[in-house]
Image (cartoon, rainbow, N blue to C red):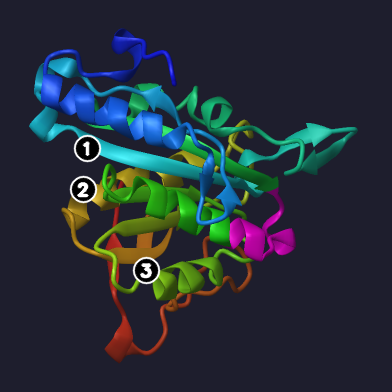
Amino acid sequence: MWKIDKGAYLMGNNDEYDNRTIRWLEKCESGKFFDIEIPKPYLLRPANSNIGHRFVHRVMMVTVGGTIAAEYSKGELSAEKGADGKSMMDRLLSEVPEEYEIWCTDVAKKDSSAITSLELDSILAVVKRDYDEFHDFLVIHGTDSIEETPIYIAHSLQNADTTVLFTGAQYSMDAPASDGPNNILCSLKLFTALNGRKFVGVVANSIGVAAGQSCKIDDFGTIFLGPVASRKYISLDR
């Protein structure tokens, strides 16, 4: 059983909320869900306890790798040697609104061109594991296959009332002109804008696009939205 540091993990002012969180953490201890071993979650940033638990917006971040998480190894940018969720978010957390409680599960460190069915099913397993505790899931993903993975997840979650957003970047989080921080902050803003509505899609360049209606043409800043009759997107400004 996890040793719960109430100051680190819990609101501390609502027993029902805190007890529910403890039960969820105990469930995560098993590590295996739907025959897939997935890592335990960890808390990236608690919400401001003064705002009250009813106004807390809980988000589970799932990291899979990609350029956004990549770091240099032997002179080359490598997703496999890349950052985990904590390292990626450390420099960004001060910009996250105080109502957000952000958790993370690090599933993989892979270039998205090398993602297999194991990583796809691991993302799905995290959503199913945490479905009762989180409505909103943010998947940090490489851009090479960021248009395909949401289609698989959307199809697999047809009967689930949840929001799963995918985002990535053309530059790593520690690059001077990285688009990663803005993409992550815009994803959080889209969770708020959707207000609990079911949605699976991609966020990039201040645009949210439904799964199956995006493709990378030249770079991550160019998104094809498909036929006018089926365009579904929300414009976001940081």
What number of labels is visible?
3
Name the residue type under label 3: Leu
Magenta: main secondary structure? helix
Q: Residues within 10 Å of mark 3 (few under 14, many from 20)?
A: some
User: What element does badge 1 sit on?
Assistant: strand
Q: Which of 193 and 47 lies nearest the eye of the viewer? A: 47
- Magenta range: 110-120
The stretch drawn in magenta includes residue 205: no
Q: Quadrant of the C terminus?
A: top left
User: What element does badge 3 sit on?
Assistant: loop
**Would you place residue 19 above or below residue 4 in this image?**
below
> Residue 105's x, y, as percent?
50, 38
Q: Disc 1, disc 2: CB below 8 Å?
A: yes
Q: In front of the other: label 1 or label 2? A: 1
Which residue matches tag 2? 192
Name the residue type under label 1: His
Name the residue type under label 2: Thr
- The residue depicted at 22 percent of the width and 37 percent of the height is 57
Q: Which of 151 and 223 lies nearest the eye of the viewer? A: 151
Q: Which of 174 and 159 lies nearest the eye of the viewer? A: 159
- The residue depicted at 57 percent of the width and 61 percent of the height is 120
| Comes first in the chain, label 1 or label 3 | 1
Which residue matches tag 3? 157
Q: Disc 1, disc 3: CB below 8 Å?
A: no
The answer to whether one can see residue 9 in this image is yes
**Would you place residue 210 above or below residue 22 in this image?**
below
> Residue 121's x, y, as percent?
56, 61
User: What element does badge 2 sit on?
Assistant: helix
The stretch drawn in magenta includes residue 116: yes
Which residue matches tag 1? 57
